[in-house]
Image: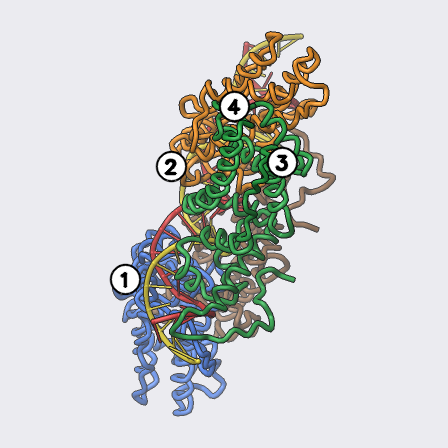
Chain colours: A blue, B brown, C green, D orange, E yellow, F red
Amino acid sequence: MNATDPQPGTTRPHTGRRRNEAAHQAILDAALRLLAESDGTPVTIDAIARTAGVGKQTVYRWWPSKGAVLLDALADRADQAAPAPSTGDLRADLRTFIATTFDGAQRGTTAPALRTLAREAARDPHLAELMQTFTASRRTALRELLTRGRERGELAEDADLDLIVDQVYGLFWYRFLLGHAPLTADIADHLATTLITGNA
Amino acid sequence: MNATDPQPGTTRPHTGRRRNEAAHQAILDAALRLLAESDGTPVTIDAIARTAGVGKQTVYRWWPSKGAVLLDALADRADQAAPAPSTGDLRADLRTFIATTFDGAQRGTTAPALRTLAREAARDPHLAELMQTFTASRRTALRELLTRGRERGELAEDADLDLIVDQVYGLFWYRFLLGHAPLTADIADHLATTLITGNA
Amino acid sequence: MNATDPQPGTTRPHTGRRRNEAAHQAILDAALRLLAESDGTPVTIDAIARTAGVGKQTVYRWWPSKGAVLLDALADRADQAAPAPSTGDLRADLRTFIATTFDGAQRGTTAPALRTLAREAARDPHLAELMQTFTASRRTALRELLTRGRERGELAEDADLDLIVDQVYGLFWYRFLLGHAPLTADIADHLATTLITGNA
Amino acid sequence: MNATDPQPGTTRPHTGRRRNEAAHQAILDAALRLLAESDGTPVTIDAIARTAGVGKQTVYRWWPSKGAVLLDALADRADQAAPAPSTGDLRADLRTFIATTFDGAQRGTTAPALRTLAREAARDPHLAELMQTFTASRRTALRELLTRGRERGELAEDADLDLIVDQVYGLFWYRFLLGHAPLTADIADHLATTLITGNA
DNA sequence: ATTTAATCGAGACGGTACGTCATGTCTTCGG
DNA sequence: CCGAAGACATGACGTACCGTCTCGATTAAAT
């Protein structure tokens, strides 16, 4: 969901100048670029505004906090979130989902951006909330994938799906943020297998 | 009572020459109190010094960064880290280890302090490093517990022990920081069972 | 009542196409009201527009600067500038002129408005220029009054008329802006007498 | 009076680092330089701090408002205010006083600085008050000069000394700020003569 | 018994970023 | 095409912390 979309149903007559889409985009681009280039040092609003060639006020007008800008910037790129696979084989679907998640997060400039975003969220409650909303949809997708598998009898009736979901994302974030161990397709494969075996 | 008020009645004399243990302790106490009471807003060095009734320089003299103080403050309390159990039954040992971890983190004022600490670590590379050192010993303990189990044949020869460790701590931090789902003894039990089953 | 509330009940219709005289007047009224109520804080264009229930651009369309609006607003009221008296008696004429000047500036809401205007002029070169044009006519009127007196022999041939004029207006502004001493008819009388005696 | 002088009688034990006199002076120097070079555009705190090579907070720590800095900067230089002359001849003393005032204000970089200061005072009530305190001492000096003359019988018993004082300073500021007519020694001479003649 | 020197509380210092405010220009839409 | 609403770039504002650097006072070890 894009935090800056106009509220649906709120048909305001809208007098006055319209939002400058170019400025909007320039801000998101600048934020994303700074997120990607960030060497750990936090991204500042001043820098975003300056990079975007925009007044600081224009940023504050449309986003309630710095975090909201960053999240929006990232969501803008991640919108093509991979659809949950559904081949009828739980292990294969799960493996694909996890591998896609691992891969998407580490592709190109996304990794540093996502890492910086997570770090900002740790301090900015507003951003933390937005991020939870953002990640909730992915968790839901994974949970539905698991539900379908259980209905086909590939998981035990009493398997704790939420726990499986959190094991996947817990592992992902833990390794992604600490970076002490890899998040490869092999790991995805292994993880999918053991999760299913453990809960069959 | 305001958290930044200096502790009343604490007439702590100068000691000159040698390090003043009372001041040292006052700083850790203040840091812990602020960590525990923190409402998400970051704990500042100024606040710690003011609360402890201490000069800022006294803090910087003994700790290289704010994070080091916070971590020290927490370690001060968490020193009685439970020894890894070793009953000869992997599932029971693992269950106990996980449950102890869950419980210790959530007991008393430790939870908010630990949460705040993790949030600070997200932005402070120095603290992040310290924290990794701190957590490494627990990870090692868990890994050794698993190794012993594997040697007894309770885990497959090719089980990825690092992956199991990261699944435990990944789940722990994920749920601990987000707080969207519980970390109970039941969960610990369930987790231990599925991890072993999946990797047997 | 808040000075920036739009005037209630003032249903001023758009007129389209031609300049809206009602809007014009509403702006001057608002400017004057804000000038008069100003507590030293500068009058902003935004406040004038909001008070007048008018868009900012409507103000800028018709006046080149904020100062121009303020001056216009004041001139609108002060238009009935007293004609220089000419009874044939220099002392009496001078006294009357000075007293009228003192009185006019201090009557009703003019005083705070004029004070604020002078303060704005100190920072706004454009307004300063406009104001000098505005005051120049009064200085000229006074100078002509003095010239007539000199021609009648009531002043020395070599009297520095410009100096006398500036003494009058210098004293006026000095006391008017600082407010440390009164500007009464008595003072006007005294001033007229000493100026003539000193320059006879 | 210097606003930054330590309060007399307040013998504070003074713990903590002492005020950096070099920074203090650098700020005043910077302020004076910017005042003198100012082309009408207001002097900003940021500019003063940057020019002085000082943190903004250091300025705010010692002066309550921008105006206070500017006034202090000027007073620092004007401290060698000419002592009121006292030769026993009122006309000569008055002439000297006025000429000195005219000359001092227009010497070197004082003129633009003083003009900018007066402009700032028009908008900054705090500065206005400080400036009135500053000018009050000069007004008092002039008044005492006149009192001595009256006691010697060179002025009428009922001469309004305050009015004479305000005529001098009124004329001065009026011409100084508007710049439409000169403030020369000749004018000082003429003014002294007519003021005494008019009030003898 | 003196020195000597490390440590203390206090707080000033140069910085960076913050979020707010006012300015004057521009764009959009309804009348 | 006027007028309201309001978005825009700019840039100063005053505050909060950062980590460093004096201060004078205190006090214990080394002379």
Q: Nearer the viewer, mark 1 or mark 2?
A: 2
Q: Nearer the viewer, mark 3 or mark 1?
A: 3
Who is closer to the viewer here, B162 or C86?
C86
Label disc, if present, on residue C92 of the rendered structure = 3
Give a yes or no on whether discs 3 and 1 share a subunit. no
Q: Sort mark 2 into few (<14), some (14-19) or many (20+) by Cα contacts within 10 Å.
A: few
The residue lying at 52 percent from left, 37 percent from top is: C145
Q: Chain of mark 2?
A: D
Kindly report the distance in space between the C-alpha atoms of the residues bearing marks 3 and 2: 44 Å
Question: Residue A96: x and y, percent?
Answer: 30, 78
Kindly report the distance in space between the C-alpha atoms of the residues bearing marks 4 and 3: 17 Å
Question: Residue C100: x and y, percent?
Answer: 61, 43
Q: Chain of mark 4?
A: C
Q: Nearer the viewer, mark 2 or mark 4?
A: 4
Q: Amino acid at mark 3?
A: Ala
Give a yes or no on whether discs 3 and 2 share a subunit. no
